[in-house]
Image (cartoon, rainbow, N blue to C red):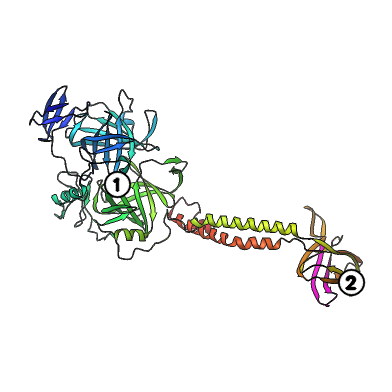
């Protein structure tokens, strides 16, 4: 529909058939369409500057369907603001593209009567069924329309009040229930989208616009008068003054003070505000610095807020020389008993605690205050960590990835020495974890090889009996040696198994034996013996020892041999003793096999011990450690 502005006469075009409100490009009059007539509601206040990459006329695609941006609604709430872009698709449908803190959400309003839950029963974390899908409430906030431009399907007048409820689920879907003041609730359902996947074109010249916006306005701290300009106008909700430490509410027209520093702190961030660096292929600018502490105040860590106009906000966190690259999550993890699952991986609960802001510098997308405290839960699956920060109004999830200090230093050109690592970070990759699987496969490979070799030796061993003889002696006359007939050991050097067997009872027999080579006269001496005892007592029958025993002589040369035996027995038990000696050549032995297994098993055992030590250190600061505590280990 084309018509003329009631205020200035300029042509006004309504691209969408459902649009009922527009702002004249020439005189900024707010125009309401009533059938074919237009009515002016007065002038729209100029929208505040921001650094969104979008503008009226930008084009893009969502799931193969092209769209054009034809309207914009600027929304604010107590902690900041965002843009809602009204989209007209080429097929005639329309939708919304929310542009908030680097998140892009494309949604469509659900037509027709929709059963929505009353606002009074909703709270962060509560599950809600919408259009046969399950969602979870992320946050509930009271909003106000700052202003609008282009055309909209409702009156986007300044001051329009509403309550906005954001929801999400594990499938990456997004939902919003809007409860406008004096109007029926509206439901929007869509998905989170990556900037690159939207295939956007006809965007703002951000590089030029950002320079213009940043240099156009200079503010003064209401506490000390110190000058400052905003790095992320339109997104900045608070600024921490670098001169006096006061935190300023930039969403308030008079720049109200949110909190004053008890004393000026002289903390110098390792990465200065305004620094630029490239991480993971994206250039980031440091816009804020926060120091936080646990509820005891003993443990502190630093967080750097990073910004890119096309990617939004990220965080760099550091604790005890360890660093993490952190981004807000668009998909909620799924609960799994006390742990959670995300991306097909299970994350173990590491700690529950509180995080308190003790120092701020720079600017932030929410109204940060010194003393601000939230509940924190961390879940780990190295090198990643999931964190949930919650209070009574919202519940936010983020995912962090462990990065090396050298990577941070290289990205931001830090010349000074990076703080040394202390201890083990919750999601620090284990140097033993990467090699554990390789070591396991190598160990199993060696075991299989050794086992195959042992089987071969067992099968291939001749295991041939070369001599068997029985001997009798009197325990009262052990001075006389026993001599065996000669026997042959054919082939090359081989092992020789010597087995002694006797049918004794509660007695023992021992012998000093020489294996004598008939040709050379050289002998090989060794000892052999058996003992066996048995009986009954109050506990029943018992026995110990054995009536047979064997030993193996290794590498015995071939030749003709005989045995010279010097027997011995218990002299207190006179009488004859008898025993049998059996010699077998080339028997299969297992001692070398088990010795080799022990040797190759030493390194996996050592590596396992080092890995356990590493994991014990990792969990030392968690009250949920599966390794117990030092007190437990000392008991």
| 304 displayed left or right of 469 | left
Question: What residue did someone put label 1 on?
Answer: 311
Whether residue 512 appears in magenta in the rendering, the answer is: yes
Locate the C terminus and report the quarter of the image it occupies: bottom right
Per the rendered image, the range of residues in magenta is 506-531
Looking at the picture, how far across and down is residue 312, in whole percent? Answer: 28, 46
User: What residue is shown at x 63% (from left), y 61% (from top)?
Assistant: 598
**Dot in front, 1 or 2:** 1
Choose between 78 and 17: the one closer to the eye: 17
Q: Say which quadrant the N terminus sits in.
A: top left
Instruction: Residue 285 in the image: state x and y as whole percent.
Output: 26, 53
Q: Residue 52: percent from the left, percent from the top? A: 23, 44
Looking at the picture, does residue 594 appear above or below residue 167? Answer: below
- Sequence order check, earlier mark of 1 and 2: 1
In which quarter of the view is residue 83 placed?
Answer: top left
Q: Nearer the viewer, residue 445 or 534?
A: 445
Q: Is residue 277 above or below residue 91?
A: below
**Viewer-side residue, 76 vs 124:** 76
The secondary structure that dominates the magenta segment is strand
In the image, what residue occupies the spot 28% across and 34% down? 66
Q: Which mark is residue 464?
A: none
- Does residue 57 appear left or right of residue 39 in this picture? right
Front residue of 292/70: it is: 70
Residue at 64% x, 55% y: name it: 448
**430 to the left or right of 298:** right
Identify the residue under disc 2: 482
Q: Is residue 193 above or below residue 32?
A: below
Q: Which quadrant holds residue 8? A: top left
Q: On the image, which quarter does residue 25 sit in?
A: top left
């Amino acid at each position: 529909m084309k018509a003329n502005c009631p205020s200035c006469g300029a042509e006004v075009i309504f691209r969408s058939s459902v649009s009922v409100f527009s702002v004249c490009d020439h005189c900024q009059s707010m125009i309401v369409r009533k059938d074919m007539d237009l009515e002016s509601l007065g002038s729209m206040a100029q929208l505040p500057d921001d650094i969104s990459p979008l503008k009226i006329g930008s084009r893009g695609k969502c799931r193969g369907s092209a769209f054009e941006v034809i309207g914009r609604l600027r929304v604010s709430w107590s902690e900041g603001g965002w843009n809602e872009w009204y989209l007209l698709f080429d097929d005639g449908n329309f939708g919304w593209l929310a542009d908030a803190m680097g998140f892009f959400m494309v949604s469509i309003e659900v037509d027709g009567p929709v059963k929505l839950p009353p606002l009074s029963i909703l709270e962060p974390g509560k599950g809600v069924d919408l259009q046969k899908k399950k969602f979870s409430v992320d946050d509930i906030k009271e909003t106000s329309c700052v202003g609008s431009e282009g055309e909209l399907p409702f009156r986007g007048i300044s001051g329009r009040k509403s309550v906005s409820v954001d929801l999400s689920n594990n499938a990456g879907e997004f939902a919003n229930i809007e409860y406008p003041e004096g109007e029926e609730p509206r439901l929007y359902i869509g998905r989170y989208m990556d900037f690159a996947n939207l295939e956007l074109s006809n965007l703002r010249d951000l590089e030029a616009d950002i320079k213009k916006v940043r240099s156009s306005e200079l503010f003064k701290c209401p506490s000390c008068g110190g000058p400052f300009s905003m790095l992320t106008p339109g997104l900045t909700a608070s600024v921490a003054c670098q001169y006096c430490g006061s935190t300023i509410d930039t969403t308030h027209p008079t720049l109200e003070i949110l909190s004053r520093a008890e004393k000026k702190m002289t903390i110098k961030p390792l990465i200065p505000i305004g620094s630029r660096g490239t991480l993971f292929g994206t250039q980031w600018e440091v816009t804020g610095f926060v120091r936080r502490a646990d509820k005891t105040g003993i443990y502190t860590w630093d967080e750097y807020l990073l910004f890119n106009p096309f990617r939004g906000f990220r965080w760099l966190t550091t604790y005890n020389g360890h660093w993490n690259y952190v981004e807000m999550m668009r998909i909620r993890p799924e609960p799994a008993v006390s742990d959670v699952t995300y991306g097909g991986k299970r994350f173990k609960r590491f700690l529950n605690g509180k995080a308190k802001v003790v120092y701020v510098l720079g600017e932030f997308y929410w109204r940060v205050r010194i003393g601000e405290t939230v509940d924190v839960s961390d879940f780990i699956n190295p090198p990643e960590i999931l964190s949930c920060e919650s209070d009574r109004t919202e519940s936010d999830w983020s995912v962090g990835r462990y990065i090396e200090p050298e990577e941070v230093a290289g990205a931001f050109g830090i010349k000074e020495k990076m703080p040394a690592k202390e201890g083990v970070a919750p999601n620090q990759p284990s140097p033993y974890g990467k090699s554990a699987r390789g070591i396991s496969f190598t160990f199993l490979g060696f075991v299989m090889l050794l086992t195959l070799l042992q089987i071969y030796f067992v099968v291939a061993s001749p295991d041939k009996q070369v001599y068997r003889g029985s001997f009798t002696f009197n325990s009262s006359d052990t001075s006389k040696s026993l001599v065996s007939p000669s026997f042959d050991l054919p082939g090359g050097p081989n092992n020789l198994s010597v087995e002694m067997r006797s049918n004794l009872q509660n007695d023992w027999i021992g012998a000093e034996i020489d294996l004598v080579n008939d040709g050379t006269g050289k002998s090989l001496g060794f000892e052999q013996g058996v003992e066996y005892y048995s009986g009954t007592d109050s506990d029943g029958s018992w026995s110990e020892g054995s009536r047979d025993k064997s030993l193996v002589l290794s590498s015995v040369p071939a030749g003709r041999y005989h045995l010279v035996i010097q027997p011995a027995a218990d002299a207190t038990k006179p009488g004859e003793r008898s025993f049998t000696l059996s010699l077998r050549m080339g028997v299969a032995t297992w001692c070398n096999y088990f010795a080799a297994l022990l040797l190759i098993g030493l390194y996996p055992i050592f590596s396992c011990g080092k890995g356990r030590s590493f994991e014990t250190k990792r969990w030392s600061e968690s009250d949920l450690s599966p390794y117990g505590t030092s007190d437990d280990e000392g008991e």
